[in-house]
Image (cartoon, rainbow, N blue to C red):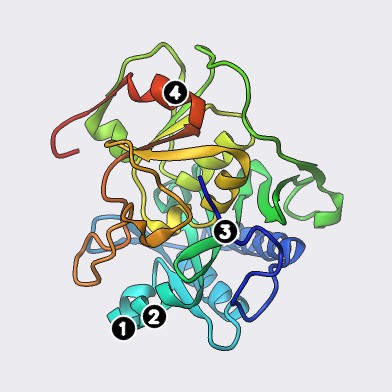
Amino acid sequence: MGCAGNNDVTEGSARAWDAAGMAELLLECGRRALAHRAASSWTLKSDGSLVTEVDRDIEALLSAALPGSGEYFIGEETIAQRGADYARAALRGSCWVVDPIDGTSSFAHGFPLWGISIGHMVGGVLRHGAVMVPECGDILVSEGKRVVHYRLAGLTAPLTAATRRELAPAAGAWQAGGVLMLGQRFCKSGQLRMPNPVVASGSAVEALAAVLTGQAQAYVGHMKLWDIAGLLPMMARLGVSGRLVDGSEISCEVTNGAFLLDMNSVACWSLRDNCVICADAWQPVVNSAVTWRAGG
């Protein structure tokens, strides 16, 4: 999976990518989200998904903190309000793509399977990314050609107290005892014929962080751009591939056809089909065991 611009100075952007700064910002977001969860009520959006005041609060924080002069901002909760012309310009320029709470249903109901994602895109290509899974204590961030994993000492502890390691690409043979992460859409519309244990997750950020750290072997599901924008640049660095049902690649090049980008469609920003994400060598193993029901 190709991903241009792996250096820390993101070509064409108004600023350099600051890996440690992104980790600190995510830590602040995680603290704020947990501090206000109990007081936040949820409502249903037009697509049937949940949203809370914390989603909006974290997105406002990131919108204020990230874009520099002339940069754009694609956030799950606000991009529809910015209009089609803005969205098209964002795909051509330097743009931050964020999901303030990925897995809002888990978050709103007190489950730990949720995360926060930041991706930086230039000319339609995702160059850098960072994600946090607050209740698991994990922050992953691209740093040059590497991916760094912070295991927090606790949300109240400073980032300097975290254990820091560089992640290595997935290697070795497929293991029948390894965990597979399943998205909600797959759980409702798919079938998996293999002996592996599974974990159903409503958060691509949480599920794919587990894949990148080696805690899980693969993810099967569906998502929108902001769910995976922070992860794709790290997947590219670690040799983890995303493939749609027809075998085509989900790459860092957002405009290559994997995502639906018709600004007049309710499906805009979604993957055009379901996907499998794992080490490239394991793709045939997982794909051969997956069945998607018609319309799923």
221 to 3, vertically: above or below: above
Three-letter code, disc 2: Ala
Answer yes or no: is residue 112 visible.
no
Relative image position of residue 279 (x, y in whole percent) = 53, 31
Q: Which of 273/293 is in front? A: 273
Q: Amino acid at mark 4?
A: Val
Could you say where residue 286 lies in the image, as x and y percent from the top left? 39, 23
Q: How many marks can you see? A: 4
Q: Is residue 111 left or right of residue 264?
A: right
User: Amino acid under label 3?
Assistant: Ala
Observer-side mark, 4 or 1, equals 1
For the point 61% across and 29% down, the residue is: 215
Asked if the residue under mark 4 is in contact with the one under mark 2, i.e. CB atoms within 8 Å, the reply is: no
**Label located before the other in sequence (4 or 1):** 1
Q: Which residue is mark 4?
A: 198
State the CA–CA distance, disc 1 to disc 2: 6 Å
Q: Residue furthest left?
A: 294
What mark, if any, has residue 4 been given in the picture?
3
